[in-house]
Image (cartoon, coloured by chain):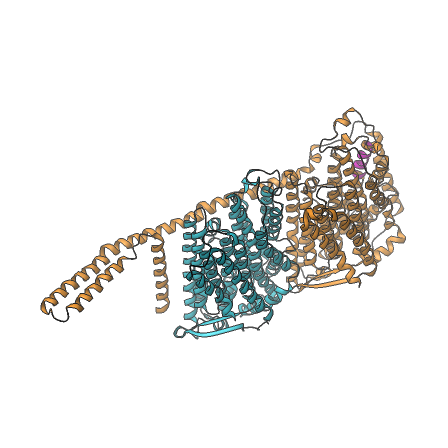
Chain colours: A orange, B cyan
Amino acid sequence: MSGLALALIVLLPAVSGIVLCLAGPRARAAAIPVSLMTATVTAALAVVVAVTRPALEIPFIAGAPVGLAVDGLSALVLPAVAIVTLLVLVFAVAEGTKSPERFHGLMLIFAAAVAVTVTATTLPALLFAWEIMGAMSWALIGFQWRDDRRVQAGLVAFTMTRAGDLGLYLAAGAALRGGAGLSLTNLSAAPSPWRDVIAAGIIAAALGKAAQLPFSSWLSRAMQGPSTVSALLHSAAMVAMGGYLLLRVAPLLAATGWAGNAVAWIGALTALLLGAVAVAQRDLKQLLAASTAAQMGFVVLAAGVGSIAGGAGYLVAHASTKALLFLVAGAWLAALGTKQLFALRGAARRWPLLGVLFTVGALSLAGIAPLSLWALKDELLAVARETSPVLYIVGLAAAALSAIYSGKVLVIVWGRADATTEAGYDAEQPGTRRIGRWEQVPLIVLAAGAALLGILALPPVSEPLKAILGETGTKAPGTLELAGSAVLALAMLALVTFGLKRGLPQPAWAAKWLGLEKAVHLVVVRPTLALSESLARFDDGILDRGLHRVARAGVTGARRLGRFDDARLDAAVEATARAGTVAGSRAARADDQGVDGAVEGLARQLRRLGTLARRPQTGQIYQYYAQIAIALAAVFVLIFLVR
Amino acid sequence: MLSLVVFLPVLAAIVLAAVPRITDAAARWIWLVVTLLDLALVVGLWLAYRDPGAGKLAFEEQLPWIPNVGSSYHLGVDGLSLPLVALTALIFVVCAVFALRHTDRPRAQAALFLFLQTSSLGVFAAQDLILFFVFFDLSIVGMYFVIAGWGHGNAARSALKFFLYTFLGSLVLLVGFIGLYLGSAAKTFDMALLAASPPFGDEPVIGGLVLGAVFIGLAIKTPTFPFHTWLPPAHTDAPAIGSVVLASIMLKMGTYGFVRIAMPMLPNAWRDWAWLIVVIGIISVLYGALVALAQTDVKRMIAYTSVNHMGYVILAVGAAGVVSDSAAQAREVAITGAVVQMVSHGLITGALFLLAGVLYDRRGSYDIASYGGLAAPAPRYAAFFAVAAFASLGLPGFSGFIAEFQIFAGSIGPVPWTALALPGILITAALFLRALQRMLTGETRGLSRGFRDLDRREILAIAPLLLLAVIIGIVPRFLLDVIEPAASVVVDLVSR
């Protein structure tokens, strides 16, 4: 029965999404009710299965079934993602969108893929859903397909994340060879070196989706998509799945000896560097995107050091926080027609409720106590500190940057609009200057999550949570650490608000996302395109032409044979025929009674032979070619027969 | 029963050719009905099919034919051939549907395609090398006339190039077959007997030479790098349904030959040369993808992706020849993936070539840059093309993923450096998304203006292919249950 609930969590959004997409404009009227009902039922079912913990297994390929199950980790994440999905869809309905059937259809298919990703227990199930998320990301970034830039951004996002996905194919091959099977929980039992290959492959896929270094730049491009898409795919659900996968395979990372450390450092560095990138951004969505990559860095760091409860809690709280911030950014974009920070000056004052909700999210992001991200960050950093004090310090520095960029945005949106502000309106699209009431309702729920999910880090909750997630022997943060990080965040916020009258430094390397996109272009894209062009020229110019040269040589040879045929063979046959005729006439003269006809007949036959021998020289080159081929075949046959 | 399936189309073809009074409309409908009937028979076969077990065949038929060289009329199917027989029957129905409004000599076209259908079905049902070869060559002749008679552009030249190249390949193949015959203890051309007691067990040099002949013959047909240069012009100038048969069915004759003939009959030589076959596979994957990326003509682009897709098959059958104790399961997965890839490529590339054909029907051009923003005037076309493109780039949910996932999961274990071919998946993704972007999205421009959307006939032809690709992609067991036992037999045979 509860297995059915799990199946429905996948099938319901998948089927209704596909039907909406296929039906097209005919389903326009049905799109919104179908979407909201599906998302509501799915969210309710997600809560149900979080309690009942069902498992499903469907035969797939030999030795690798598709397995879905709800365990401790997914029991936490699945309802969270389902609820955020519902809230984002409610917001999207309130905001209104072109082609709602296509938008909601794609979002529902995406929701189904996320459900499979979260509950997957085997590699094929994971990879299956993983790449469908990528495809939906492509389709949704380029949702406004008349705009080439947006479609191009989707292409960049899909190919860059798929570059990481190749790792999952590699991992599957290594797992099958390693003999431990394709079940995610057994991967750590594979013998070395297969285990290391599996770990490396999974890490590559996870880093790609989570927009960690060196993959981060695709997330910047992905901001071309609608804000609702950014809220769900490019923060709360899809990008978060990268961190989630690493949390899920944390035992494997630990078993290899090297992978945990590598992952932890990549996460910490991403948190630090992308935090700096966020500080330097002048576009709200770009800032939030860089911040998403940086915040995912904390989750990845947690997975690397084995702080599963801290990482999972952080993931859930961040999903709520960042979805909220992106949706507010989207509401402002729709109302004011801009997401440039200078033009958003005073936006919070203009719509105070929205401003307050945004502030709750931004303060949580900044790590201000007692909001959710503060304590959860300390929980995972406490575990990191046991691994390496340097890692801990890098993490703290990254936390300080979160406070700085959050503060930067807050200062702007609560500032007073001036003459230059309004000049920046409607730069990207004509603004409506209105924000509907229903757009704010889902935001209140998200803000509550952003504020309160920190309870996951309170010892009465966090200790049982750790037990459920199988995390043992990790240290909880001390009072000093908690207080210290709270003071640090406040100090940074104060510094930005009061201390920096002349604004924050915006170095070009940070503003341009560390030059990552240019580097990818220079190192991968351009050489590949150049290689592709030159191979295409080689194919036409050398391979194919070489073949023609061989064919021409064949034809020339055939012509020579033909001349030989004319000059010698044919002449010989003709001569024989003539000789026959002559002989015949002589015989006739000798005996004109009786045999004359027979001899004439023979001569005729011989003459015909002569014509026959001439027939192959048709002048048609392909017939010569075929003759040579047959002759060659005959020669081969002969060689075999006499060997 | 199997003979009826194979020869029903050619009987209809003879009637169509012999009775000039049949009107054009009647000819088209006769063609469609006969292909549907044949498909129904094949579906019946599929439902009645039970795995015959190692070394045995289902629906077997044998009659003496040329007894003095040990050749007989021997038909039968197993898990390797049944999926391809079914694919063939389906593809020819699709062609008949798509051609329902063709006005250019429909009677002759119908007869020719029915003839081609018999020769294609015969290749996959034949269990005797001579019989196989006869059907193999007849299909080449049939395709020559399809391209030369109904093609466009430089059709005569492309048809000739196709004919000469593949015919020469078939002769090399024949040399290999004769080698097999001479090497066999029983002096036979019978496939089952040859597989049961493979020749050249202790003569690696001659075995290698014979494998060389068989391999080159099949590699030209597949085609693999460097034997592929006949493919792009043949596709570019062939009519849409000709391209479909060429890509969906005829290329499979090459890859099918590897698992049906080369691996079971020359196991020692196959194992000796497996590394080279893997190398050719990897090169074909990467080379095909990279050259496809540079194409500006949509049909040429799809043609080169065929080189890439068939490269995966070569990679898998090569890797399955690298024998090690712990990787038996992986090698079975690789072979299963290879056979699924044959079916999958048939479905998806068939759909893509029909969609390319629609471009030519409407505007007479395959030039990608001449289109743009097609999604506005032709939303259904854009949706179909996008779905087919994602299917072709191996997105999960489509058959291509089932194939490619199994190929890599099964090949990387036995031969870790097959992972070098993984970027092929990425390049294919990039090239298809780029083509989608250039043709379908953005402002409507150039030849896209006023482009008529897909009509019902075109949708009826294309939709079944994509639907089946989705069904295999989501619930693959019905197909894998047929293929897996046969794949396991192939792995056992090649490990001897």
Judged by its main secondary structure, the magenta piece is: helix
A581 lies left or right of B447: left
- Looking at the picture, tell me which residue is in the foreground, A489 or B478: B478
Whole-percent x, y for residue A526 in the image: 57, 41
Quarter location, residue B321 = bottom right
When the figure is inspected, residue B353 is found, relative to residue A413, above or below; the finding is below
Whole-percent x, y for residue A37 in the image: 79, 51
- Looking at the picture, tell me which residue is in the foreground, A351 or A245: A351
Residue B430 in sight here: yes
Q: Tell whether position A410 is magenta.
A: yes
Whole-percent x, y for residue A20 in the image: 70, 50
Quarter location, residue A390 = top right
The C terminus of chain A, quarter of image: bottom left
Residue farthest top in this picture: A419
Quarter location, residue B461 = bottom right
- Looking at the picture, tell me which residue is in the foreground, B309 or B250: B250
A319 lies left or right of B453: right
B195 lies left or right of A128: left
Whole-percent x, y for residue A150 in the image: 66, 40
When the figure is inspected, residue B37 is found, relative to residue A285, above or below; the finding is below
The N terminus of chain A, quarter of image: bottom right
Residue A249 in sight here: no
Q: How many marks?
A: 0
Q: Tell whether position B469 is magenta.
A: no
- Looking at the picture, tell me which residue is in the foreground, A462 or B336: B336
- Residue extent of the magenta highlight: A401-411
